[in-house]
Image (cartoon, coloured by chain):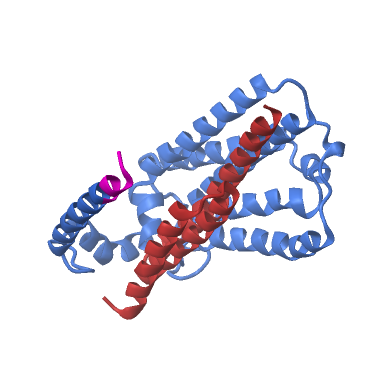
Chain colours: A red, B blue
Amino acid sequence: MIPLQAVSLALVAAGGLGVVLARDVVRQAFVNGFYGLSLVVLFLVFQAPDVALSAITVGGAAAPLVIAISIARVNRRERGR
Amino acid sequence: MTRRLRTGLFLAGGAGLSALFAWGFAGLPAFGDYHGVYGRLLNRDALGQTHAMSAIAAVTFDYRGFDTMGEDFILFASVLGVALLLRQVRERDVDAGQAVETSDPVRAVGAIAVPAFFLLGLFVIAHGYLTPGGGFQGGVVVAIAIVLLSIAVDYGSYAALVRKPLADLVDGLGAGAYVAVGVGGLLAGSAFLESFVSRGKIGELTSSGTIALLSWASGLEVAGATLLLASEFLEELLARRQR
């Protein structure tokens, strides 16, 4: 394993831990975005550029969109209570 | 349960899990150690047979083109389901004029990001068989560039541009075009999804035969589907805000 691979693996581990440790949901959504980015780097470093491109579109666009809209919906329901 | 007991339980469980993980990973083959036959055959034959420089595009749109058609229709059907469900339960149409205003910095970033993402998406679709990429990835990027308009300009202009019938049409056209290319193979006298166009010269934009056509078809389908999905969710959000 070359150092670059070790570093990107460590980044993914740190990112995953960060998502779990974030307490505020909105902040957690942001941390999750950075975690998705670290996965993209991981796939690229392990020579899977096609998967990296898919990870950009899923982790960088589709998942944040769904998460952001869900948070907005839940927040409104709690405020209305 | 006291705090000490819980911590002890966690430490014992964590140690057990780590030991199992370490044991499992110690037995893994080295990185790049590959024993599959299919991959070796593809590495040897794919370039000569399909003239596609990206072996992954050769697999998804040629050797396994039928599977990709199934995946296209899975996406098509699930987006159709979302649209049917959300349109059914939405009580009234959204007044697009009432939507939120955006700030100048957001507009400035959007003015750069929207055209850049749009072009990048088209590039990724167009070069899917030469470099990494293809219809799926490029289609999502194109759709996201258009969705960005809703915050870069305002929701009203976005909704006016992306009329849902248009997104429906693009989605359906893409899915239909994939099947049409497949039937083209039948009409040309060979099998369904068999390439009936000249394979061209390796490395050129006009190479790889129907792989290019299928990549564009699924790019269209994915772009339409993503756009439709995002529009339905955005409209759902605004409908709740305005109630």
Task: Please name the residue shown 77% across and 22% down the image.
Answer: B92
In the image, what residue occupies the spot 59% across and 23% down? B85
Q: State left or right for residue B102 relative to residue A15.
A: right
Whether the magenta-drawn stretch holds residue B5 is answered as yes
Left or right side of B183 for B143: right
Foreground of the two, B183 or B1: B1
- The residue that appears at 77% across and 60% down in the rendered structure is B106
Q: Position of residue B94 (x, y in %)?
A: 79, 30
In the rendered view, tell whether residue B182 sits above or below residue B43: above
Please identify the dominant SS of the magenta region.
helix
Does the magenta run of residues contain B195? Answer: no
Q: Which residues are magenta?
A: B1-7
Residue ID at (24%, 47%): B9
Q: Residue A38 in the image: x percent, y percent?
A: 45, 64
Considering the image in quadrants, where does the N terminus of chain B appear?
Answer: top left
Residue B31 in sight here: yes
Percent from the top left, x then y, of residue B173? 60, 38
Given residues B31 and A5, the one toward you in this image is: A5
In the image, is residue B27 above or below residue B226? below
